[in-house]
Image (cartoon, rainbow, N blue to C red):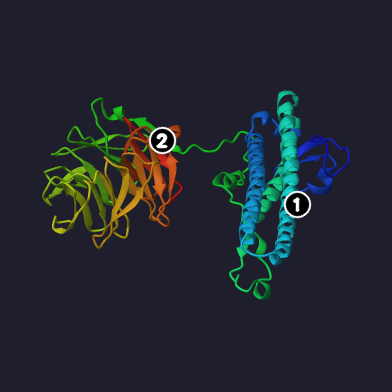
Amino acid sequence: MFSTCNHHYNKRLSHFCQKHDEVICAKCIPESHEECQNVQPIEKAADTAKFGYALSSLETRIQNLKLIVTDMLRVNADNFSTLNDQKQTVKKKIKQIRSGINAYLEKLENELGNDLMEKYKVCVKEIDKERQIYLQQKENLDDWTREIKAMKNHASSVHLFSMAKLLHPKQKANEDSVQKRLADSKTSNIEFEQSRILLDFKRLVMSYGKISIRESPALMSSAHRKAFVIPSLLSRNDKPPSPVVSKFETSVFGNNVDVVRGCFLPDDRLFIPDSKSKIIYVCKINGANIKKIKLRHIPKDACVLDRSHALVTCGDSGIMMVDLRTLSPGTMIIPGGHCSAISCNKDKIFVVNDECKVSVIDLKGKVLKQITTRYDPYMITSNKTGVIFWTNYNNNNVNSILPNGTSQNVYSGSDLRESTGIATDNRGNVYVAGCDSSNIISVSRTDKSSKTMYAKRDGISSPLGIALSTDKSKLMVINNKQIRVYRTHSN
C-alpha cells in the first residue's frame, strides 16, 4: 500500500523530494523533479523515521479524528432518542387537544399523525445516512491504526516513511471531510405548533397545528476544533519547542536569599530583590553574570521606570530610585505609609502604602489620588492606559482600578486559587499566578475568558511573583526557590 509510486504503476518508491515533500520513484525524477535540488535516496531521508515527529503527529491526528467520529456517532444516537421523545410528546399534545373536541377533528388528527410520521421518517433517514458515513470513516481509521501499529513493529524505516507521506494527504482529506460535515451538521427536531383558534371548529379549525422539522447546528467542542489544528510536518528529528527559555535556583544568589518578587530590565536582565537583606541582584535570564546593588533598606518590590531607572519599595522608608546605568541606589521618594507592591506608567507611580489602599503619586512623592480597595492588594501591575490590576493572596480574584477610580472584578474562577503575581501585556491581556493551583493563567482583555498558560507539567510550583519582559515575549516566574523564564508569544 505504501511502497509503490502514485504516478507510475508498480514502480518502487526510491527517492524523497524535500522541495515538494513527496516520496517518488526513479521515473518521477526526470519527469517532474529534474530541477529540484534536494532529491535524495529514500534510505537517507527515512533515517530514524520510526521515531520521527511526522509519523507520531499523523498517529495522533488519526486518533483524534477517531474520537471525533465516535463522538458524532454518539450525537447521532442521541438524536434518535431525542426525536423519539419529541415524537411522543407531540402525540401526547395532539391527544390532549383531541379529547376536548368532537369526531370531526378525528380526521384531522389522523392526517396530522401521518404527517408527523412522515417527518419523523425523513429525519431518521437523514440521520441513518449520516451515521453510515461516520461508521465507514471510523472503519477506515481503525484499519489505518492497525496497519501503522503492525508496520511500526516489523516494517523498515523506508516503508514507515513512505507510509507517513502517502497517508498524510489521505488523512488530510478525511479531516477536511469530517470538518465540513461538522460545520454543516444539523440536528433534526420535531416541533408542534398548536392552533389557537378552537371556537368554531368546523369553520375555523382546519388542523390541530403544524408539524415541522427544525434543524440546529451540532455543537463542535473545543476538543474537536483542536483536532483540526494540523501541526507542521517538521523534520524527522524535530520536536515541539519547550516553553521554558531558562531556569535556575535562587540559591545562586546565596543560601539564605528569599526571592518573592522581581522584574525584567530593558536589556533583558533580571532585577531581583532579596526580601531578607538590603540587596538587589541583577543577572542574565539564566542566572549568570550576577551583580549586587547594596541598599540602605530591605526591598519589598520593584518595577522599571525607564531605561535608566528602577523603583524599589522599602516599607516605611518609602520608594528608592535605582540608577540602572551605575547599578547604584539614588534618591528616596516619600509618599508616606508602608510601601509594598508597586507599578508605574510614564510619570505616575502606583503603590500599595496602606491596608486596602493604592496611592497614585508623582515622581516627587506627591499623592495625586488614593483609592480604597475591598481587600488588601498583594501584588499590582498597570497597563499603558493607566488601568491598575491587583491580586489578593487570600482569595481567587483578579481586580482592576480604572483611571477614574472605579473598581471592577476582572476574573474569578475555579482554575485560579490564591492569586499572587500579576502582569499585563501590550494587548491588555492579564497574566496571573495561582499559588495554590500551581499555574499561570491569562485573562483575555476582550471577553474576560481564561486560559492556562503554564501548569505543573511545565514546572510551575506554588508561584509567587511574575513579570513580563519589555517586549512582552518572555515571562519570569518566581517559583518555589527557583526562577523560570517562559516564552509568551504575546509580543
Mark 1: secondary structure: helix
Q: Viewer-proximal residue, 302 or 14?
A: 302
Mark 2: secondary structure: strand
Residue 190 visible in the snapshot: no
| Residue extending farthest front | 102
Rendered location of residue 398, percent (x, y):
32, 48
Q: Tell me the quarter of the picture where residue 484 sits.
A: top left
Image point 34% across, 52% down: which residue? 410
Q: What amino acid does circle 2 point to?
A: Ser
Q: Viewer-proximal residue, 413 or 157?
A: 413
Q: Tell me the quarter of the picture where residue 299 sits.
A: top left
| Residue extending farthest bottom | 203
Q: What amino acid does circle 1 point to?
A: Lys
Residue carrying label 2: 246
Rendered location of residue 289, percent (x, y):
32, 34
Q: Viewer-proximal residue, 361 or 20?
A: 361
* Dot 1 or dot 2, earlier in sequence: 1
Residue 32 in the figure: left or right of residue 430: right
Q: Viewer-proximal residue, 362 or 400?
A: 400
**Residue 354 in the image: above or below residue 236:** below
Mark seen at residue 471: none
Rendered location of residue 318, percent (x, y):
13, 47
Give the number of marks.
Answer: 2
Residue carrying label 1: 125
In space, the residues marked 1 and 2 are separated at their CA atoms by 59 Å
